[in-house]
Image (tube, rainbow, N blue to C red):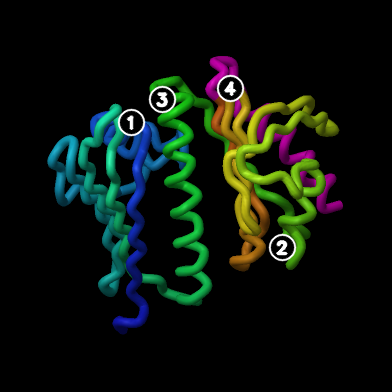
Amino acid sequence: MTEDRKFEIVADTVLPGTPERVWQAVTQDTAAWMFPTDQWPAVKTVEEYPSHLVTRMEGPDGWFNQLEHVLEPLDGGRAQLHYVHSGIFADNWDEQYDGASKHTAFYLHTLGQYLQHFDGKAVVFTDIQGPAASQVPDGFLQLKNALRVDGLSEGASFDVELDGVGRLSGEVDYSNENFLGLRTADALYRFFGRNAFGAPVGMTVHDFSGSGDAELTAKTWGAFLEKVYA
């Protein structure tokens, strides 16, 4: 195992929640802003509630994946988060590091959106992957055009009628060349331009309405993505 296969991604951000609420979000409520992690065989090597948490996964030949969260309270019920993701990439180091670091920024932003708008609400999580045809240079741009939000900046309002999905209205809370976040009154929609990192375009839906149906959501949005890339 060579040194150049190791990586470390560091991020510092202020979150709209107390250290206790952030701790809850990153340990128990990951499906509300990232994806479910309850099946991961991670070990808490440091657990100093609510200020310092380190979880680690290990594998053969020195492989490991580690997440560290250091939390400090701030005025106004906020928290300062120092986040470190470290480990080893087995292949395509540059591409994987670029993808992981950009995903980190998007996930931490989404964590803030959850804490600010939906903290504590039950969530129904759905992950939908686009077809192989989305894995082209302009794949993510095609999706933005189909959503009719291309050109809208962060903070802009949207109100669109999508074929097969229905009406969506809310705010663009995140937008760049690789990621898009749409927030409605009862859900967070996350779109991932993973075509830039050697994978199909994907999306997740975090439904806080109280009546979410993961199977129906997957079917509806899966059909929408199939049409986009037909």
Question: Between marks 4 and 3, how big is the CA–CA gap?
Answer: 12 Å
Mark nearer the viewer, 4 or 1: 1
Residue 187 screen position, x and y as percent: 58, 27
Q: Is residue 4 left or right of residue 163?
A: left
- Secondary structure of the residue carrying tag 1 is loop
Pointers 4 and 1 in contact (C-beta within 8 Å): no
103 sits to left or right of 19: right
How far apart in space, not on screen, are marks 4 and 1 (Cα)? 19 Å
First in sequence, mark 4 or 1: give its number. Answer: 1
Q: Identify whether 44 is placed above or below 100.
A: above
* Amino acid of disc 4: Asp
Mark 3 residue type: Asp
Give the mark nearest the N terminus, 3 or 2.
3
Mark 3: few/some/many CA within 10 Å (<14, 14-19, 20+): many
State which mark lies toward you, 3 or 2: 3
Residue occupying the far top of the picture: 210
Instruction: Please determine whether, in this image, residue 154 is positioned above or below residue 163.
Output: below
Q: Which residue does the numbered mark 3 point to in the structure image?
A: 119
Q: Does the magenta stretch mainly form a helix, a strand or a loop?
A: helix
Does the image show residue 43?
A: no
Left or right relative to 15: residue 209: right
The numbered mark, 2 or 4, whose residue comes first in the sequence reads 2
